Image: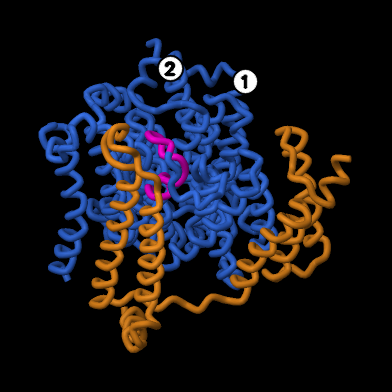
Amino acid sequence: MKNVQKSKRANKSLPFFFRDEFRVSLVIILISVALLITTFTFDIVPPILNRGIQPATFPKALLVLIILMTLFIYYLATKNPWKVEKKLPRPFFLTLSSFVFFVVVSKTLDFFLAISALSIFVSYCWGEKRLFYLLLVGIIFPIIVFIFFETILGLRFPPGIITNIYYS
Amino acid sequence: MDNLLLMLAPLFSSKLLLVLFFGTLFGLILGVLPGLGPTTGGALILPFTMTLDPLSAIVLLTSIYCAGTYGGAITAVLINTPGTPAAAATCLDGYPLAQKGEAGRALGMATVSSTVGGIFSVVILVFFAPILAQLAYEFGQPEYFALAIFGLTMLASIGEGSPIKNLIAGAFGILISTVGKDFMTSIDRFTFGINELTEGIGFIPVVVGLFAMSEMLTQSTLINQVFNRIALKAIKLPSKDDYKKTWKTILRSSGIGSFIGVLPAEGGTVASLIGYSEAKRFSKNPEEFGKGSIEGIAGAEAANNAATGGAMVPTLALGIPGSATTAVILTGLIIHGVRPGPDLFREQPDFLYGIFGAMLIANILFFIFGFFGAKIFARITLVPNKILWPMIFAVSVCGTYSLNQSIIDVWIMLFFGVLGFFMRRYGFSVVPVIIGLILGELVEGTLRQSLVIFDGNWLMFFTRPIALTFFILSLIALAFPLIRSRKFKKKL
C-alpha cells in the first residue's frame, strides 16, 4: 500500500506533460483526430442509392466516442494518477528494433534470412551465448518450420536470396 | 439419446481421437509455460487448422482451451507463477502448500477439481446452449445489435482493469473491423491506398500480434526474473478427508464458474477469483486461506475450468465470445465458414455435439495426462525464454504468412504486437480489441440494417422488448463497476 502511494506521489510530482496518463491520452486523441479527418475523405453514397447511414458515419461515431472516453480517463487520472511504470530495459528496445530489422530484411533480402537473423539476435540479446543453442534457434528450428510449411502445408514462401536457391 | 450418440462420435473416430490427444497434450504444455496459455496457443495454432476439416479444427482448439486452463495450475503450485491468468488464484494456496512439502497433494486437488469443474460445465453447455439458441430465433437485427452492445459492456465491466479503458479497447477493435471495403456500399474506408487493406484486416495477424508478439515484448522486460522451483516427487489423489472438506466447494465453484463463463467477459480469470473468495466465505477455516488451504485450491481450480464450458454457451449459441480463448475459437469457426447461432444447432447437430463430446473427453484426458505426467510437464518450465520465444517468433511469422501468403499480414502482426505491448503496459486489456474486431461487423451491420427497417428512427430500438432488455442490462453492466467501487470504499 505504501509503495503504491509513493509511486502515485512520484507521478503527481512530475509536470503534467511528462505523466503517462497525459502522454497516452494525447497519443490516442491525436491518432483518433487524424483518423476522424480521414473519414471526411471517404466517398459519399448518392442519396438515391443510400440505404440507412453513410459509410463514414459509423467510424466517425466510434472515433468521437473514443476521444470522449479518452478525455474522461484523463480527467479521472488527474484525480487518481496512474502508477509510474518501470523504465523499459535494454533487451526490450533491442527486441523492438529487431522487429524493424525483420521488416527491412524480409522485404529487401529474404524472408527466411530475416527469421533466422532475428531469432539469433533476440536469443543473444536475451542472454544466450552458447553457440549450439544460437544455431538451434537461428538455423535448425527455422529450417524445420520452413520445411514443415513448405512440404506439409504446401506453402510457397516469398522470393529472396536463400529461398530462390531452395526453389531453383 | 441421438444427441448422446453424437457426443460419443469423437470416441469412434481415430482422427478425432488423435486430434484430441495432440490438442490436450499441446494445451497442457502451453498452460504450463508462463506467458503462453490457451489463448496465445490457440492463436498460434489457428493458421495450422486450415489444413483440417472444421470439426477437427474446433476440436483441436477446444481441447487446447480445456487442457491449457488446467495446465496453468501446475506452474502456479510449483513456481508461484500462474501459467495462465486464470490460475492466479491457485498460487495463493497452491504454492504455500507446496512449500510445506505437499506439492503432490496440491496438484492432486487441482487436477481433480479442474476435471470435475470442466465436466460439470460441459453438462451445462449441453443443456443450456440449445435453449439459448432457441431463444435466438426471436432475435432480429435490432436484437442482435443490442446483444452485441451488451456483450461489449459486460466485457468492459467484468473484465480486468479499468472499464473505460476496456470500452476504448473494444471501440478500437470495432474500428479495425471497418478497415477495407464497406460491406453495404463497397466504398473504401481507412485503406490509405494500400491494395491489401481493401479486403480488411484479418483476424489472425491481429490475434497473433496482440497475444503472442506483445507477450514476446513483455518477456523481453522480464529476462532477469528468477523463479524458485519446488521439486515434485509424485502427484497424489486427494485423501478421503480432503474430499470431505472440499466436495461442497468444488460443486459451488463449478456452478459459479459455469455461470461466470456464460457471461460475455474474461471467463476463467474472473471465475477463479470469485470461486476462491466464495470458498473462503463458506469455509469453516477461513484463516487457513493464503497459507496453503486445500479448499482454496479446489475453489479456484473448479471455477476456472468450469468457465470453459460456460464460455462456449454464448459462443456457439449466439456467436458472442464468452472469453478471450473462445474469441479465438470463434475466429476458428468463422475462418472455417461455420456461422455460430441457432441455425448451427438445427443444421449441424453432429458438428456441435461432436464439440461437446470432445470437450468432455478432453477433460478426462487432461486428468490422465496431469496425473501421470505432471512431473514431466513441470520440467517444461525449465525451457529458458531466450530459446523458447525466438522459436515462437518463427512459428508466429510463418503461421501468419501462411493464411493469405501475404507479407503485409506479417507486418500487421508485428504492428499489433508492439501496440498490444503498450496497451497492456498502460492498463488497456487486449481482449476487448479482439472481441470488438470479431463483433464489429455484427455491430455495424445490424445497426445499419435496423436503421433501414426503422426508417432512420433511432427511438424505435426501444420499442422492441428484447432489445430494450439488453440495453437496460448494458446500462446496469456499465453502472456495476461504480456501485462496486462505492461499496468497496464504504467497507474500507
In the image, which is nearer the foreground, mark 2 or mark 1? 2
Q: Do circles 2 and 1 both sit on a common chain?
A: yes
Image coordinates for residue B152, horizontal then vertical, percent: 30, 47
Among the 4 quarters of the image, the one containing residue B142: top left
Report which residue position mark 2 lands on: B348
Question: Does the rendering let one see residue B102?
Answer: yes
> Could you say whether the residue bearing mark 2 is in a helix, strand or loop?
loop
Q: Is residue B429 left or right of residue B454?
A: right
Q: Where the N terminus of chain B falls, by quadrant?
A: top left
Give residue B14's mark. Answer: 1
Q: Is residue B257 above or below residue A30?
A: above
Give me the residue at 37% from left, 41% from top: B439
Q: Which chain is orange?
A: A
Which region shows up in magenta? B174-186
Q: Is residue B355 above or below residue B396?
A: above
Taking the magenta stretch, the answer to whether it contains residue B71 is no
> Upstream in the sequence, badge 2 or badge 1?
1
